[in-house]
Amino acid sequence: MKIEKVHYRNIVLSASVVLFFTAGIASAQQQGGRDVPLLRQVRWSPYLAGAGIGILSILTFFFSNEAIGVSGAFARTAGMIEKLFRGEKVEAKDYYQKNPPAINWEWMFVAGLMIGAFVSAKLSGDFEIVMVPGRWLESAGDSRFFRWLVAFIGGILMAFGARWARGCTSGHGISGTLQLAVSSWIVTASLFISGIVTAMILFHIVL
């Protein structure tokens, strides 16, 4: 655990936000005329979810001295896969000298996101395997191959863009903006604008 300097005010702050978030999780909100425990709700309050992300960011900075990020884990995974075929030569690359192709806290964070999303969907009864989403079906047809091809290409472009921008929606949109980094605000604004334009093109939305 990497901590450069511990101040009592940081401990008090961290404890306070944890208690706040725990109280929110334990509470029940009104949904559909009956009380539904938060962990079983299909949609959480955006205010509570936003507060939870803020708390997670604070605790991540405090305990690991690192910022929340996701795209770096995929780069490390690519390195680990390449290492299976090329061995130690992979570690000679400039990027992997600074970011070794190995499992680290960020990699485990991404794994936790996937596991948490699955558990949340199961608890809320919203888990369902869908090959072609409804909106895509209406807009582009029922071809599974075309849907997967577009998703695969889109994933490559997103990963390339995230590494080129030196951060993803987590690294820039959460960690960077909360530190008031100008580059992160520019990237986040670009993400929203490009996402809106892309959705309008894909789903034939006309203003």
Image (tube, rainbow, N blue to C red):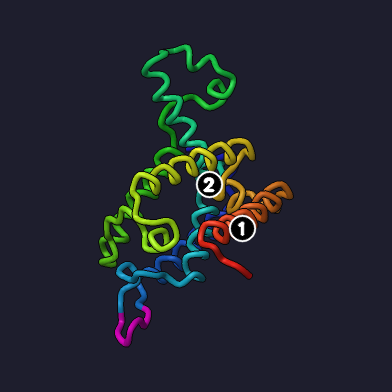
Q: Residue at x 58, y 46 (%)?
A: 171
Q: Position of residue 149 (x, y in %)?
A: 41, 42
What is the quadrant of residue 81 in the picture?
top left
Check disc 2: other Cα within 10 Å, few if <14, some if 14-19, many if 20+: many
Observer-nearest residue: 152 or 51?
A: 152
Which amino acid lies under the numbered mark 2 shown in the image of this protein? Ile
Give the Cα separation between the discs numbered 2 and 1. Answer: 27 Å
Q: Position of residue 74 (x, y in %)?
A: 46, 36
Q: Is residue 178 visible?
A: no
Dominant secondary structure, magenta: strand
Query: Is 33 included in the stretch rendered in magenta?
Result: yes
Q: Nearer the viewer, mark 2 or mark 1?
A: 1
At label 1, the amino acid type is: Val
In the rendering, at what x and y percent does residue 63 appear? 50, 45
- Specify whether 102 is left or right of 181: left
Which numbered disc, 2 or 1, marks the residue that appears first in the sequence? 2
Provide the residue designation for mark 1.
Answer: 197
On the rendered structure, is 68 left or right of 186?
Answer: left
- 59 inside magenta stretch: no
Q: Which residue is mark 2?
A: 68
Which class describes the residues within 10 Å of circle 1: few (<14), some (14-19), or many (20+)?
Answer: few
The one of 151 and 173 positioned closer to us in this rendering: 151
Secondary-structure class at tag 1: helix
Magenta part of the chain: 29-35
